Image (spheres, grey):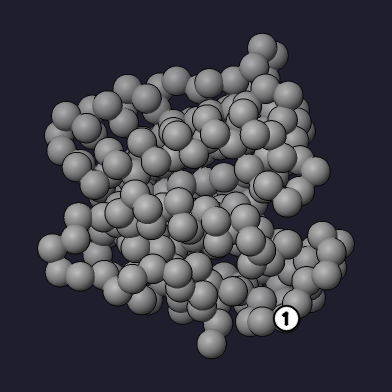
């Protein structure tokens, strides 16, 4: 069994989304499951795959080594197989490596309802989308200081039909939402989850007016002074 699910079976008539939430290179750890439970409490069905297929990760360094040993193509193939259980009203989400995988899957899913990127991103699709895709991106300022290409990425994402909101958190490191990591920032985590939950709630009630609000939000990047 490669998938950990904490949700109750999705019932006909439920109004929430189906979220595929993918872990970072550090593996399926308690903070990822805590995030899934948070999403469930707000009415969403959450699928939390173990993309390492049960291989234990004893340390961050071990997680990075395991990621490299499996390889990104195989991890993407595993994530794609997990996505087949999502059904309609689906949102791709992930942390760091999981965010990279989430965007790769969304790039090739014309019916995706949304994309939630925490601590990572991937290349935009090679051609414009037929239907706009709401995207929310959360980055620590330390990451952004090493991403001089971020502005070009944002422009490219919007040109290919994404409604992009970007939030950059001052004085934060890479995995600032990870409560078991030295990067953790409680204040930034609270803000990121408040924004993420609002983003998903807007997707649930996606109307023409809410699409306009996504578009207005996508024009703004919240960032510290001097960030890319």
Relative to 13, 120 lies left or right: right
Relative to 9, 144 lies left or right: right
Does residue 65 appear anywhere in the picture? no
Which residue bears the numbered disc 1?
55
Where is residue 2 drawn, in percent x and y? 55, 82
Residue 47's image quarter? bottom left
Whether 140 is drawn above or below 7: the answer is above
Relative to 20, 100 lies left or right: right
Whether 149 is drawn above or below 11: the answer is above
Quadrant of the snapshot with the C terminus: top right
Relative to 221, 185 lies left or right: right
Identified at 44% across, 40% down, the residue is 196
Where is residue 67 drawn, in percent x and y? 74, 69
Where is residue 95 drawn, in percent x and y? 60, 52
Q: How many marks?
A: 1
Identified at 24% across, 47% down, the residue is 204
Identified at 36% across, 76% down, the residue is 85
Does residue 145 appear anywhere in the picture? yes
Characterize the local packing of mark 1: few (<14), some (14-19) or many (20 or more) Cα atoms within 10 angstroms.
few
Where is residue 173 drawn, in percent x and y? 75, 35
Identified at 84% across, 64% down, the residue is 59
- Relative depth, front residue between 182 and 61: 182
> What secondary structure is marked by label 1?
loop
Extreme residue in the bottom direction: 1
- Relative depth, front residue between 104 and 142: 142
Residue 8's image quarter? bottom left
Whether 133 is drawn above or below 61: the answer is above
């Amino acid at each position: 069994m490669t998938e950990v699910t904490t949700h109750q079976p999705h019932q006909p008539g439920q109004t929430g989304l189906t979220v595929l939430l993918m872990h970072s290179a550090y593996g399926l750890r308690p903070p990822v499951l805590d995030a899934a439970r948070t999403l469930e409490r707000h009415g969403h069905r959450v699928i939390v795959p173990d993309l390492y297929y049960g291989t234990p990760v004893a340390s961050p360094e071990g997680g990075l080594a395991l990621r490299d040993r499996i390889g990104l193509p195989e991890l993407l193939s595993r994530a794609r197989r997990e996505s087949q259980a999502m059904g309609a009203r689906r949102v791709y989400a992930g942390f760091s490596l999981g965010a990279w995988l989430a965007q790769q899957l969304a790039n090739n899913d014309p019916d995706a309802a949304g994309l939630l990127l925490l601590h990572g991103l991937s290349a935009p699709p090679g051609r414009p989308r037929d239907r706009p895709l709401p995207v929310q991106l959360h980055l620590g300022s330390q990451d952004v200081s090493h991403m001089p290409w971020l502005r070009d990425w944002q422009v490219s994402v919007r040109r290919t039909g994404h409604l992009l909101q970007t939030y950059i958190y001052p004085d934060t490191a890479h995995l600032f939402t990870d409560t078991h990591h030295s990067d953790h920032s409680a204040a930034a985590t609270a803000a990121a989850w408040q924004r993420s939950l609002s983003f998903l709630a807007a997707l649930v009630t996606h109307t023409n007016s809410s699409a306009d609000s996504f578009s207005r939000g996508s024009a703004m990047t919240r960032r510290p002074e001097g960030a890319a």
